[in-house]
Image: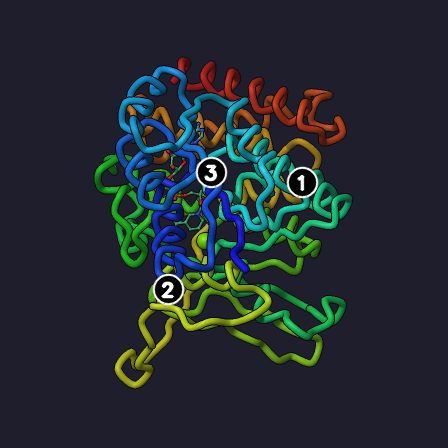
Amino acid sequence: MTRRVTIFGATGSIGANTLDLIGREREAFDVVALTGGRNVHALAAAARDFGAEVAITAFDDCLDDLREALAGSGVEAASGENALIEAAERPADWVMSAIVGAAGLPPGLKALEQGATLALANKESLVTAGPLLMETARAHGAEVLPVDSEHSAVFQALKGEDIASVERVIITASGGAFRDWPIERLKAATCAEASSHPNWDMGQRITIDSASMFNKALELIETKEYFGITPDKIETVIHPESLIHALVGHSDGGLIAHVGPPDMRHAIGYALHYPERKPLPVERLDLAKIGQFTFRAPDPERYPALGLARDVMEAGGLSGATFNAAKETALDSFIDGGIGFTQMADVVAEVIEIMSADSLVNASITLESVREADQLARQRAKDVIDRK
Ligand code: NAD
Ligand code: MG
């Protein structure tokens, strides 16, 4: 029987890796919807190639180009946020959530409301609205499967284990592009320098977030929200080889580690075939050749984002939405040359400080309140940036 699949963010790094896996077993899948942003030619090419029912660009001003690129293909074209929601309403068995940023939340929630299995690469969904996302899944008997390498690793290491016996969860970090730079140099780091990762080939935004460790900060929060464990049990350690993705420590002192090549097709493929394991086209590690796994503690001064994530985990509520929106705004400004690399964390810290006095932070988490907190934090972040 074929499975109906939809991919949100099909033109991105995770989207392309997902299509790569699906393309190796075409007879097993029917592609329902593929979505993208401004890269309408890549979107149209994938939609034609996979015979998708519909292709959607997030941006209305790209619709004419998308229509033109799909002419004669029989694939429907649509645009905008509502079209993304409508795509999520089309019956599907498995939905990949791989839009980058807070924009990934609404279609993921809608897919869960339809009872689809949600393969979640969009960590921002858990950071901004973890309790809402997990509750929506529960209420509709739908499953959320983690597609972040660390969280897929924890998920696999927990299989058959009792979560109550878990003493600690350690997610590893590569340390990003600047892990060996003298700390004084970070102020002058350029966007091009921050956009290259030592081990992983990913989208530009998450690559820069790896250099600043905002990515790891998001992932600490993601760990808390997905696995429902308390912040004191969640740790991170720098592991420059990026081969151990996470370790789960049990009450008897044993650690169960997940080891694999830095290739997202492992986590995507695991979620695609779950609960089965199927052969995947990833490199097999030669441990003797690798020789050693090394670790070091992250320096809080070099990576202030990690401390901010601790504050957010403690505060809960809408602080995750605030944190993420401030981070996205600071990142936009860094990419556009508005602020320097180390100023991103300064901006986020200031916004969290300003908004901690806001009653909104204690409001209950709904799609509306998340949107409101997100917009307010973006505005506050812009104000802070303007003053810099
Ligand atoms: P990417 O930038 O390569 O792709 C992002 C996708 O989202 C593209 O299809 C783009 O067109 C679409 N998009 C961008 N802005 C949008 C908007 N406003 N509305 C709708 N669609 C929009 O990103 P990526 O590296 O593939 O990452 C996607 C998600 O997966 C992120 O949440 C990231 O944190 C997470 N993730 C990525 C990796 C990785 O290896 N790339 C690993 C773990 C988790
Ligand atoms: Mg990750």
The three-letter code of the residue at mark 3 reads Ala
Q: Earlier in the sequence, mark 3 or mark 1?
A: 3
Q: Nearer the viewer, residue 318 or 270?
A: 270
The three-letter code of the residue at mark 2 reads Ser
Question: Where is residue 179 shown, x and y percent of the image?
Answer: 32, 54
Question: Where is residue 216 shown, x and y percent of the image?
Answer: 47, 50
Q: Is residue 211 visible?
A: no
Q: Which corner quadrant holds the C terminus?
A: top left
The three-letter code of the residue at mark 1 reads Gln
Q: Which mark is residue 242?
A: 2
Q: Confirm or deny contact between disc 2 and disc 1 (CB under 8 A).
A: no
**Which residue is at a point 59% across and 22% down the rendered structure image?**
354
Name the residue tied to disc 1.
114
In the rendered view, would you say 378 is above or below 42?
Answer: above
Closest to the camera, between mark 2 and mark 1, is: 1
**Which residue is at a point 60% across and 46% down the rendered structure image?**
310
Closest to the camera, between mark 3 and mark 2, is: 3
Distance in Å between CA atoms under marks 3 and 2: 33 Å
- Horizontally, is 163 left or right of 49 in the view? right
Q: Nearer the viewer, residue 8 or 168?
A: 8
Q: Earlier in the sequence, mark 2 or mark 1?
A: 1
Distance in Å between CA atoms under marks 3 and 1: 15 Å
Q: Which mark is residue 33?
A: 3
